[in-house]
Amino acid sequence: MKNFDVYVRKQLLEKYSSMLFFLVIMLFPSFGVKAFGAFFIILFSLASDIRQKRLDLMTFLPFTRKQLFWMEYTFLLTLVSVTFFVGLPFADRSIDSWLILIRAFIFLSTYFGVVISAVSVGFDPYGAAFLFLLADLVLGGIGSSRLGPTFNPYKLISPIYQANIFASLAFAFVLIYAAYKLFIQRGGER
């Protein structure tokens, strides 16, 4: 737990100014707002460190690549949770407000997996994130999630549309696992 405290302190000290705006926005109890904030916080997190070639400095702290991956993921989940609970008094008192938290976790997990996978194989994290976002919006916007002639199975696992929470969650877990494996093996630094 001490390593996690050091990591959180390091991230907050280095990236507080770039994260502050998005953290304030994420206080609003809406999935779209939380997804917007989480999207940009992911880009300013570990992906930014890898892109600016600071990963080796972080492994001297001494963090292993496994620890870095899971601490960053836990840190991001904590940020989403804290903003949710701070904004909870302003939300509706229903199960829908808790679904916003679950959907935000799924969105964060999916995009974290995509960005870390992309940067681990040498792609630009910003380009990969925006390209996946565009593809997700287009592919998820086609057709419907109901069986029929316009059925679109991607809509079920889309991190934005999430027509089926369980399918979206499974897709997020697959992407997190793939990102973890790629990050451990390749690390992203060229």
Image: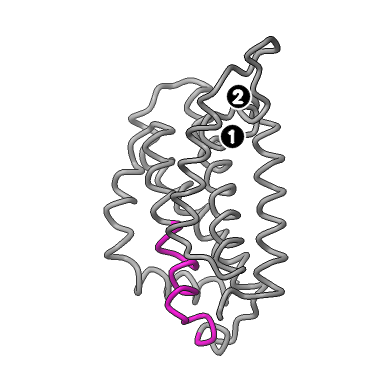
Q: Nearer the viewer, residue 134 or 17?
A: 134
Q: x, y percentage for residue 113?
A: 60, 55
Q: Nearer the viewer, residue 69 or 2?
A: 69
Residue at the spot 36% in from the left edge and 43% down from the top edge: 26
| Prevailing secondary structure class for the magenta stretch in the rendered image | helix
Precedes in sequence: disc 2 or disc 1: 1
Q: x, y percentage for residue 9?
A: 42, 73
Q: CA distance from mark 2 to mark 1?
A: 7 Å
The residue labelled by disc 1 is 158
- Snapshot quadrant of residue 29: top left
Instruction: Look at the picture and state if 149 lies above or below 96.
Output: above
Q: Which mark is residue 120?
A: none
The residue labelled by disc 2 is 163
For label 1, the SS is: loop
Question: Per the image, is 38 magenta?
Answer: no
- Snapshot quadrant of residue 149: top right
Q: Quick one: label 1, few (<14), some, or many (20+) residues within 10 Å? A: many
The quadrant in which the C terminus is found is: bottom right
Q: x, y percentage for residue 178?
A: 71, 58
For label 2, the SS is: loop
Q: Nearer the viewer, residue 119 or 49?
A: 119
Q: Which residues are magenta?
A: 42-57
Q: Is residue 44 left or right of residue 164?
A: left
Residue at the spot 60% in from the left edge and 24% down from the top edge: 163
- Snapshot quadrant of residue 115: bottom right
Farthest front residue in view:
149
Question: Per the image, is 48 magenta?
Answer: yes
- What residue type is disc 1 on? Ser
Q: Are marks 2 and 1 in contact (CB under 8 Å)?
A: yes
Instruction: Look at the picture and state if 162 lies above or below 27.
Output: above
